[in-house]
Image (cartoon, rainbow, N blue to C red):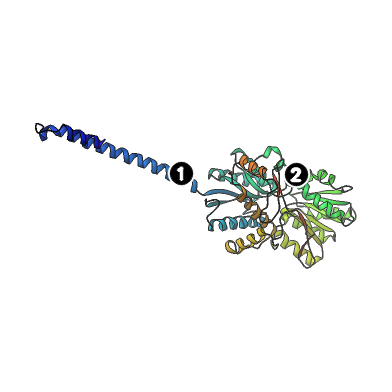
Amino acid sequence: MLNFVRAFLHIHYDDRMNAQSLLPIYAWERRSRRSVVMLSVRQSLVIVTFFLSAFAHAQSALKIGLVVPQTGALKGAGKDVASATVAWASEHNRSGGLRGRKIDLRVYDDESSADGAKRAATKAIADGVELFVNCFGTVACIQIAKEAQAANLALLGPIAGAEVLREAAFCNVFSTRPSASQEMAAIFKYVTTVGQSETTVIYQDDGFGKGYRDVLAKATESTKGFRIKNQFAIDINTRNFDDVAAKVIASGEAFSVVLLCNTPNSIAMINALSKRGYRGINFNLAAQANSTFITAVSQEVRANKIVASFVTTAPPSTSRAAAATGYRTALASWAKESEPGYVGMEAYVNAAVLEKLTEGFAPARIDATLRRHPRDGQIGGIPMSYQPESRTMRGWLDIAVVSQTGQIRHQ
């Protein structure tokens, strides 16, 4: 445009045109120049703003919600889960994050209760988390799953065996551990290997305990010829551990007792049984493979020569698997005060599943990604296979026994 103006002036200028007559033309040229310059500046600003916005979005931190007990009865297990997950995130951030995005791990306290879990999940969603990873305990995980589902967010790796979390209604939940019935079936199968065909079950009389009790039939069906000899309930209000222990002893010789209880109630029940002279095997679920439970039970085993065993859904942290090495290294760097353990190892593996999710973190995208590679689920050397009907990455399942010296051996 400016070149055209200059050409016009050159062609039409003659001696008869004085400077005064050219003023309007010069003024028009100056206005045109300013208009072009202003237009160029505005266009540049728009373009720069667009690319900066796109770059910022591409590089924005990945907000992940971690809701676990930091206070209350389950805070010990919550600490194991939080330490492992924070260590995983910190280790990745040191090397650039996850696929170019820094990990912004937000930790919330579920207060060891359903109401606390609901409040924490609601707060996390308001804070803009893109998904949830890990949680501890059936009661809390169900509440978190509900809030996440309402916001169309995924919950990856709930540390809970509740069957409901694996049903179609919770299509936003992706597990890596076996269900409650599969855990109990593993216990029953182990009991049969030593010539026994029955067991006694003790459950805490609340949603957690009843949820596990309700799938006993499913678990026994998978173990031919096995049966439940007796069932006794712990009143969570009166904490009648001694009464229940007395009933177990009065019912006749019991080779094994399966405890469907949380960590503090399991410890209290084992102590009550020991005081009553029970010397059979105390079996526990995988959620009790945490440092608080193992420390307390190991002391009881050494002092009173009882036998304690529990399910593990992750290999021991001392194993040679790459995930175990990564877990130990990450804890040593970022959570020196934490001791490696089974629940922490499980939490670390759950977080590591995020590394497989290359197509996004919405529930539908996670499902599609895992369906595409159902048998290619190696997580740190731990073979896993995806079962779409329950959205579960099936992997490790084992029985650990606490020896009389306090050492843990696997079957």
Front-most of residues 112 and 47:
47
Q: Nearer the viewer, mark 2 or mark 1?
A: 1
**Counting other residues with Cα less than 10 Å from the Cα at mark 2, is it few (<14), some (14-19), or many (20 or more)?**
many
The spot of residue 325 in percent (x, y) is 65, 62
Badge 2 element: helix
* Residue behind mark 2: 211
In the drawing, does residue 166 fall left or right of residue 30?
right
Amino acid at pointer 2? Gly
Do callouts 2 and 1 mark residues in contact (Cβ within 8 Å)?
Answer: no
- Disc number placed over residue 191 in the picture, else none: none
Amino acid at pointer 1? Ala
Judge whether 193 appears above or below 216 on screen.
below
Front-most of residues 5 and 73:
5
* Residue behind mark 1: 54
Judge whether 182 appears above or below 399 on screen.
above
Front-most of residues 2 and 152:
2
Location of residue 78 (image quadrant): bottom right
**Counting other residues with Cα less than 10 Å from the Cα at mark 1, is it few (<14), some (14-19), or many (20 or more)?**
few
Badge 1 element: helix
Residue under the image location 84 percent in, 44 percent down: 221
The spot of residue 402 in percent (x, y) is 78, 62
Quadrant of the rendering where the N terminus is positioned: top left
In the drawing, does residue 340 fall left or right of residue 31?
right
Location of residue 331 (image quadrant): bottom right
Residue under the image location 19 percent in, 35 percent down: 27
The spot of residue 46 in percent (x, y) is 38, 40
Residue under the image location 71 percent in, 60 percent down: 316
Query: Is residue 234 visible in this depiction of the protein?
Result: no
Q: CA distance from mark 2 to mark 1?
A: 47 Å
Query: Is residue 189 visible in this depiction of the protein?
Result: yes
